[in-house]
Image: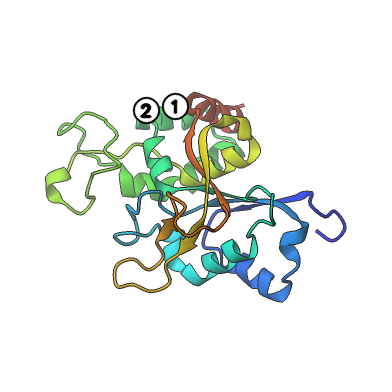
Amino acid sequence: TKARPREVELLMLGPLTNLALALKLDPTLPSRVKGVTVMGGCESARGNASRAAEFNFHADPEAAHIVFEAFTPQAGEAPRVTIVPWELCVAQGVPWTFFDSMCPPENDTPKGKFFKDVNRGMEKMLRVKRYDATPEINLGRDINLGDDNNLGQEINFCPCDAYAAAVHERPGMVKKARDLHVEIELNGVHSRGMTAFDWYGRSKKPANVRLIQDIDNDAFREMLQETFLA
């Protein structure tokens, strides 16, 4: 970043621990970074790691807090941190039939193997084997994976990191976004790690993130096919 200030863009696909440590070692780092795209957080506090928190922020809330504070925009500056939240990933989920089309036997290439390996954990967690109980539908917003009454119901394939990478690489894919101020809940019995968005401007603080709320799903699928099937 020192050799090429404001040219480097960061893509963060896990807890923000490493970036927070870098900021502690070099507090001037934000002045040299063009932008940061983060997969993490919940737009509406519907957590997947706790009641209110998404996994990456729940794993290290202090790191997320450090990053958002460090990248607070200067007066007149647009937010340089982009958040791709959990709910967007679930809402943009694609049928498992599409996933299967990405993993044909003939796609025995390094890219094809990588696609299968990197998504194996998600397939095991979200894809239910009892297809006879319920047709393939997107129940990601409401399904309780631990409820036996939901056996046979599926959450569609939602590769969260890939959505963030798509937004990072192809910003034109974004259909809806909003600039907001966000803070990370560092305490709370049920809300630690929650992304507390200031939807109505009550804090009077400037927007410090751009929240992605919708993307072009067809373009996303095409990007996956171009990347892993070409």
Q: How many marks?
A: 2
Q: Is residue 72 left or right of residue 136?
A: right
Q: Quadrant of residue 20?
A: bottom right
Identify the residue at image location x=35%, y=60%.
49
* Kind of residue indicated by mark 2: Thr
Q: Residue 7, can we see it? A: yes
Residue 67 screen position, x and y as percent? 59, 64
Q: Secondary structure at mark 2?
A: helix
Q: Secondary structure at mark 1?
A: helix
Q: Is residue 120 above or below residue 96?
A: below
Q: Is residue 94 left or right of residue 153?
A: right
User: Could you tell me which quadrant the N terminus lies in?
Assistant: bottom right
Q: Quadrant of residue 191?
A: bottom left
Residue 71 screen position, x and y as percent? 64, 60
- The label number, if any, that marks residue 206 in the structure image: none
Residue behind mark 1: 101
In space, the residues marked 2 and 1 are separated at their CA atoms by 6 Å
Question: Contact (CB < 8 A) between labels 2 and 1?
Answer: yes
Q: Quadrant of residue 92?
A: top left
Nearest to the observer: residue 221 or residue 168: 168
Identify the residue at image location x=37%, y=28%.
97
Instruction: Classify mark 1: residues with Cα within 10 Å, few (<14), some (14-19) or many (20+).
Output: few
Find the residue positioned furthest to the right. 3
Nearest to the observer: residue 6 or residue 78: 78
Residue behind mark 2: 97
Nearest to the observer: residue 159 or residue 211: 211
Q: Is residue 36 above or below residue 165?
A: below
Identify the residue at image location x=79%, y=52%.
6
Nearest to the observer: residue 170 or residue 202: 202
* Kind of residue indicated by mark 1: Ser
